[in-house]
Amino acid sequence: DEVAYGYCASKDRKFFGFQGHLLISMTGIPVSLSLTPANVDERDAAYDLIETIAGLLLGDKGYIKPIFKEDCEAVGIDLQTPLKKNMKDNRPKKFVKLIMRVRRRIETVIGQLAHYFDIEHSGCCNMWRMTARMARKLLAYNVGVFLNVQAGKPAIQFENLITA
C-alpha cells in the first residue's frame, strides 16, 4: 500500500513505485531527498524540502502553481521556474539565462544519478527499503563529488573519476 502509479509528464509515461523529490545546492550537490508514492503531487512533497531553505529556489515547470509560489514567498523563498510555452515571461533576459544555466547543472546531477547509480529503478516495494537504497546512492554520489574536489576537478565531473 506504499507504492502507487504515477505519471511523468517530461517522459510522457506512467510508472509504478515511488517518486523522489531532490533538493540540490547551487554547486550541484544533493542536500535533501523526500520520497513519496508515485501518485503524490511534487508540489505537495516540496513542502517537506522547503522548510530548510531560504532565498532562491529553482524548480522545474511542475512547480508552477500560484498557491505554492505564495506559500514559498510567505517563508522567504523566491521560487523561480521556467515558464510554459503559453506563458508570458516578464523577467529580465539575463536573469532567465542564469536560471537556465543553473537548471542545466541540476539536470546534469539528476542525469548522473540516473546513469551511474540507476536511481530511477530501485525495485523496492516499501518506503524503508527505498529510503535506505536512495541514501546509499546519494552517499556514493557525494563521495564522488568529494573525490573530485580533492583531485582539483569540477565537483560534478564524473567522467574519468577513477583512472588506472
Image: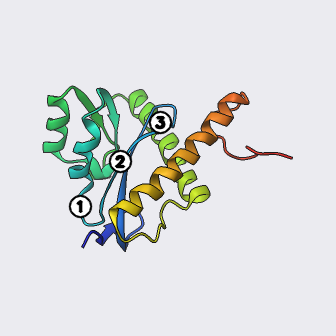
Q: Nearer the N terminus, badge 1 or badge 2? A: 1
Please state which of residues 120 and 107 is positioned toward the viewer in this rendering: 120
Secondary structure beneath dot 3 equals helix
Residue 33: x and y, percent? Answer: 38, 47
Q: What residue is drawn where x is 38% and y is 70%?
A: 12
In the rendered structure, are the residues bearing label 1 and label 2 in contact, judged by CB atoms less than 8 Å apart?
no
Q: Does residue 98 sit above or below 158 in this rendering?
A: above
Which residue, given by chain and number where applicable, does mark 3 sit on?
A: 102
* Residue located 14% across and 36% down the image: 70
Q: How far apart are the alpha carbons under marks 3 and 2?
A: 11 Å
N-terminal label among 1 and 3: 1
Does label 3 or label 2 sit earlier along the sequence? Answer: 2
Label 3 sits on what residue type? Val
Name the residue that disc number 1 marks: 40
| Mark nearer the viewer, 1 or 2 | 1
Quadrant showing the N terminus: bottom left
Q: The residue tagged with tag 1: helix, strand or loop?
A: loop
Q: Mark 2 points at which residue?
A: 60
Q: Distance between the residues labelled 1 and 2?
A: 16 Å
- Per the model, the C-alpha gap separating discs 1 and 3 is 26 Å
Tell me the crowding category of disc 1: few under 14, some 14 to 19, or many 20 or more residues within 10 angstroms, Cα based: some
In percent of the image, x 73 and y 43: which residue is there? 161
Q: Is mark 2 on a helix, strand or loop?
A: loop
**Tag 2: amino acid:** Asp
71 shown above or below 125? above
In the rendered image, the vertical position of residue 87 relative to residue 100, given as above or below: below
**Image position of 62 (left or right of 135):** left
Q: How crowded is mark 3: few (under 14 residues within 10 Å), some or many (20 or more)?
A: some
Kindly identify the residue that appears in the image at 42 percent across and 69 percent down: 124
